[in-house]
Every structure is written in structure tokens, then in C-alpha cells.
Image (cartoon, coloured by chain):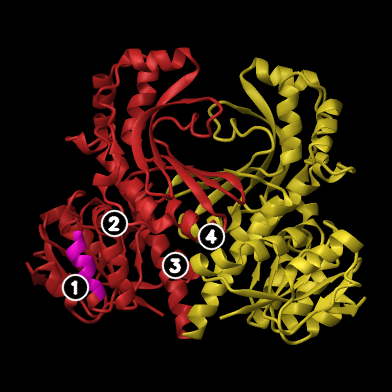
Chain colours: A yellow, B red
Amino acid sequence: MKIGLLIVGFGRVGQALAKILSDEATLLKSRYNLDVEVKGIVDIKYGAIYSTGGLDLVGALRSINEYGSFEHHKDYIGSISPLNLIEKEGYDVMVEVTWSNIKTGEPALTYIKKAIESHKDVVTTNKGPFAVAYREIVMHTNKYNGIVRFEGTVMSGTPAISLGRECLAGAQIYMMEGILNGTTNYILSRMEEGISFGEALHEAQRLGYAEADPTSDIEGWDAAAKAVILANSIYGLDLKISDVDLTGISSIGEEDVKKALDRGSRIKLLALISPDGDVSVRPTYIDDRHPLYNVSGVLNALLYRTKMLGDVMISGPGAGPVEAAQAIISDLIYLSRIYRYRAR
Amino acid sequence: MKIGLLIVGFGRVGQALAKILSDEATLLKSRYNLDVEVKGIVDIKYGAIYSTGGLDLVGALRSINEYGSFEHHKDYIGSISPLNLIEKEGYDVMVEVTWSNIKTGEPALTYIKKAIESHKDVVTTNKGPFAVAYREIVMHTNKYNGIVRFEGTVMSGTPAISLGRECLAGAQIYMMEGILNGTTNYILSRMEEGISFGEALHEAQRLGYAEADPTSDIEGWDAAAKAVILANSIYGLDLKISDVDLTGISSIGEEDVKKALDRGSRIKLLALISPDGDVSVRPTYIDDRHPLYNVSGVLNALLYRTKMLGDVMISGPGAGPVEAAQAIISDLIYLSRIYRYRAR
């Protein structure tokens, strides 16, 4: 079946997704049986475009590049509130990729609830909603018999969540340990090479790893949000960011990094996630016997400690618009499989 | 729904599975919605037990421990050919864990085809069938509208196959590189510490990592079979072990290992799996920038090189009866999800 999409938010992730859906349409259909049609795109900055017959994605991307708006696109329907489009019939899955506040989850949280109430399934990469209202979203989704997928909220396209929830089902995870933020890991890795915190941060910004305002990374909010999402989705808890024992890396000096190296250790911004709800994100000395010791630079990694298998680790990229768009693609492929079995 | 199982083969993996299904029944049901009932167990050595109302697994395990046979078990039905039981109605999934030949795939291959023809789904950890007749099994399964799961054939319970097939769907894997055999990796790691090949092998045997006849590990057949299964299942090819460019580690001397270390490298028995069907398993020098450089001892790892995400790596155990049984559990949980959606 053809899956109709509504893309809410058309920043870097939304645009990367549109490009992949356009460039890789044939491959996605032939190899993964994923056949999607983007019915609508809405962004508070660019306005909305909608077509029941499916949008021309190349044209949509060109509109933004050339005019910074959808205004000249043939399917432009005005500067409509996303909520109005979300309620509208005629699509199956809302892809929610707005810029949302990590601490309130808004506006993503409102959009997700509205889509679920409108009997749509949801794919999103926004961390905020799952870091502030996980249980609420799950209950709402169950009530309406919907599905919400959010692979891209942790480690971007690296499938850390589905590895833990689906592939490791039954293994009995009793601890998760993660390096969940690439910017801070990059800074700490560069400091080991003798560069100062300030220089390393500047470099990370120049390379596009860190935002102009790097507070969320440096102070650990980003990693804490991901740790909370893992705790909630893997252990079924209902934690919020404020439940995390959180220390960022801004107070780490060159002498701390050097001291660690001298004793054969490294400082990592380590997330520790325990099933009893103890979650911490803190600069931590780890030695060379620890599986995360060699996770350097912008690389992210998550270690699942399990009763049945011992340690299983996944490592990969933790950020980037294409990587986030790939998370959405994998979630859409998951949904298309479910739809096929449902339809049998 | 309750899933009825027929366990064919009751060696170390079958027994580990029976123990987990018995010990963890409550948890598997409450947390993963997995509700199974073992209807039958058949082993050419122990005979067969069968009960339409479900077997007592503790009693079955006790029979083997105490008598080395099912003969005194209350549900004993004689020394019946597995094929006769496989054809029998009254179960949903055959768990196939016989001792099978890695080069012919038998008797597992025959059992799998028979179960599929009898409209059963199959979960197995036997490498042979997928290394000699992958396409044949897939076509047979599709013809009968069945499902065959085989997570445990590669890296045991570490979910390397489902990571590649399901979680990384859409990422466009253009190369796989793996350390897929724990025995050889253990031997090479110990040789780096100055121990001879012979001593390291002896140690691996004493620790239970290597078989009494270690040929399949040392000469690379085991790793080659896994490489073929990855090539076939991830890229959709139809390779056999004989298609692999294969060199084992028996000719690696202490001086080779030392020479590698001197230039900052390590020798690993590396599987390289390319989508065009080029598959090799060979002792390979890899340096410290390679993601598999730090995979030491019995640890296994698989590196997926992808267009959308760059490198994603998974590492974990590659062998062991409990680990293989966990692979079966995860495949059963997968099937139970499918059955729920089918039934809707």
C-alpha cells in the first residue's frame, strides 16, 4: 500500500527526508517495499503546501532554496496552522520534525497528541516530548490504537532504540551505559590531544557539530534527554529530564583530562541508566577495559548489559540531518511492514 | 495467543532454551507478550516426547540429566523420526537445533523444508542450511507463505542479522566487515600477549571456546558460513561457502603477530562481505584507526558501512548455548508480534 505522509516542520531534517524520499524512491520501493506519497508539508516559517495527489518534492525543496517560502509553489495553501492540517483527513503518518523545546517538548507534543487523536500514526525525531511526557504519549497512543515511532530521538539514525526494544527482546537488560552526545565527546577527545576546552568547542562549532549556543550539549541536557528516553522506552519508566543526576563538562579542565590519561583512563560524559530509575549523566573516568573507552570523537555508543548475553554494544553517528532522516525512513519501513500484516 | 512449539534436537542449545522457557515464563509473558507451550521435543539420541496439552520442561530436562533419555518421561512416545513429528499437526513453530553438518546443512535443511511444507514457521540456529541453500529455503518459505527466522546463525544471540535487515533498513549497506569467530579471535589476541598458537588453542579448548576438533574454527569454515549467511540475508544473494575466498589462521606464526604489533597493527580473521558477491575470510592486518581494532578475545563484532549513516558497529558474544537460546527467544518474540498483527 501507498503510505500518505504529512511532514510537519521543514528544517534541515525535513528537507533531508524530502530529498531522500525523492532521490531513493525507486530503491525504497523495490528493496524495502516502502511506497510513500507526501501529501502535505507545513512549516510555520514557510507556510503550507498540500495535494491529495501527492506533492512534487523537488519543487518543494526548490521553493525553499530559491524563495525561502512555499508561497510560489503550485500547491501552496497559505500560512496555515499545523494543527489544522494535522486534523485533516487524507494522510496516514505524520512525520513530526519541528524545532521544539527540549524542556517543554512543545510544539511537538501538542502536534503528536493531535495526530494520534486524528487516528494517524506518528514518526518523530523530537526528543522533548518523550523526555517530558513519555507515559502520557504511550497511553494516548494506546487509547487510539495508534503507533508512535521515535528511533531518531537517540543517537539519530543509529538504531539504538529498536536494537534494545526489538532485537534484544528477552535478553533482560539490567543496565545501559552510553556516550550519547557527539559534541561533548568530540571536545573531550580533542582535549586529550592537548587542545583547550575553548579551542575544542570553537572547532566543534566550526565543523558543524555544536550549535551557536552550545549550552544544551555542554551542560548535558541533550544527553540527559536521550538517557530519559532510553529509560522510558526500554524499561517502561516515566522519568523526566529533571529526574536525571546531571553534570555537564563545562568545569572539566585540561589538567583533569591529563590526570585521567596519566592513569590510563579517559573522561567521558557517561550516561548510566538503571532499571530502578537511577539515571545519571556525568563526566566519568573510564579505563581501557571498559567497552566505551575507545569511543572517540563525534562517535556515539550505547552499551546494553544483559542477563542472557552479557554486553552488547552499538556504535555509530549520533547527529546530522541525513542521519535523522534515515531514522525516519527506518521507522516508516517498520510501519509499512505492520500495515502489510494488518491488511492480510 | 499461545504459540505451540516443536523442539527438534535437544543438545546444549535445546536444553538451554527449555530452561529459559521454564525459568522465565512469567517474565516473557508479562513483559514481551510471549506465551509459548512446548508440545513436543525430539532428538535422535533421546527419543521423542509429545503432549497436546504442553510438556513439563523441568521433567524433560531431568530425564536427560538423570537417564540420558526421554524413555522414562511420562509423555514418551518412542524413538520416532523427527520427520514424522514435524509433519504432525498441533504446533505452530518448529525450533530446529539439531547437530547438523555445516557443509551439507543436513539434517537441518530437510527438517526445515518439511516444516515449511507442513505450514509451520521455523526458528533455527543452524548455519549449514543457509550457507548451502539460502535461496532455495527462501523460495520454499515464500511458496508456503511461511516465516523462517535464523538470528542465532551469526554471532549467536547478538542480533547482528536483525540489526542489518530490520533496524538498518533503508540505510543502504555497501560493505560488511566482521570478526565472526570467537575462537580464532581469542587465539590471535592471546598470541599478541606472547603465547604460542598451540598454547592459545589449548587454552581456548580448556575454556570451552573451541571444540575438541577445532578445524571448523581454525580453518575459517565457521566464519565463512556466517559471512555467506550475511551476504545472502542482507544483500539477497545466493552464495555458498565454496564461493568464499577463505584462509584460516593455522599458518599464522608468533613472528607474524609480533610484526603486526610492531607496526601498530593487529592480525584479525576478517570477513569482508561486498554486495557484488565478493566475500573473503582471511587473516588481515588492521590498524588502530579501524573500528574493529579493539575487538579482542572471544568478542565478535560486525561493522555495517552504510551510505546514509556511515559506519554502524555492533559487538557482543558470538557463541554459547544460552546466547543461542536467546537468539531463539528473540525470534519467537518477533513471530508473536507478527501473529498478533495477523490476527487483528
Badge 1 sits on which subunit?
A: B
The magenta stretch spans which residues? B108-116
Type of residue at label 2? Phe
Type of residue at label 4? Ala
Q: Mark 1 — residue?
A: B86
Q: Residues within 10 Å of mark 1 (few under 14, many from 20)?
A: many
Q: Mark 3 — residue?
A: B334
Above or below residue B321? Residue B76 is below
Q: Report whether mark 2 lies on the same chain as mark 1.
A: yes
| Quadrant of the frame with the N terminus of chain B | bottom left
Type of residue at label 3? Tyr
- Closer to the N terminus: mark 4 or mark 2? 2
Above or below residue A189? Residue A65 is below
Q: Residue at x 63, y 74 (%)?
A: A36
Q: Mark 4 — residue?
A: B169
- Closer to the N terminus: mark 3 or mark 2? 2
Q: Position of residue B244 (x, y in %)?
A: 30, 42
Q: Report whether mark 1 lies on the same chain as mark 4.
A: yes
Q: Quick one: SS at disc 1?
A: helix
